[in-house]
Amino acid sequence: MAREYVWLECTECNSRNYRTPKEMRGTDRLELKKYCRAERRHTVHKESRKK
């Protein structure tokens, strides 16, 4: 099983707040509603690969 860490980036302020493991075979990009400390509210976070 190929698992890789991905970062979850806030769509509002573009800060990377969370890192989570993800199964890489045949999956779409993650999109979760998480708490952003910079915005001080829950916002949509999208997957971005570690650079």
Image (tube, helix red, strand yellow):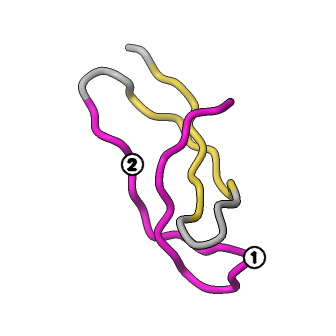
**Residue placed furthest toward the top:** 1
Residue at 39%, 57% (x, y): give it. Answer: 31
5 or 11, which lies in front?
A: 11
**Residue 5 screen position, x and y as percent:** 58, 31
**Residue placed furthest toward the right:** 38
- The residue wearing badge 2 is 30
Rate crowding at label 2 as few (under 14), some (14 to 19) or many (20 or more) other CA atoms within 10 Å. Answer: few
Q: CA distance from mark 2 to mark 1?
A: 21 Å
Above or below, 16 against 48 in this view is: below
Displayed quadrant of residue 9: bottom right
The image quadrant where one finds the C terminus is top right
Residue at 66%, 70% (x, y): give it. Answer: 13
Residue at 54%, 80% (x, y): give it. Answer: 42
Q: Which residues are magenta?
A: 27-51
**Residue 41 screen position, x and y as percent:** 61, 85
Residue 4, numbered circle? none
**Residue 15 screen position, x and y as percent:** 70, 60
Q: Is residue 50 magenta?
A: yes
Check disc 1 and give the amino acid type. Ala
- The residue wearing badge 1 is 38
Which structural element holds mark 2?
Answer: loop
Check disc 2 and give the amino acid type. Leu
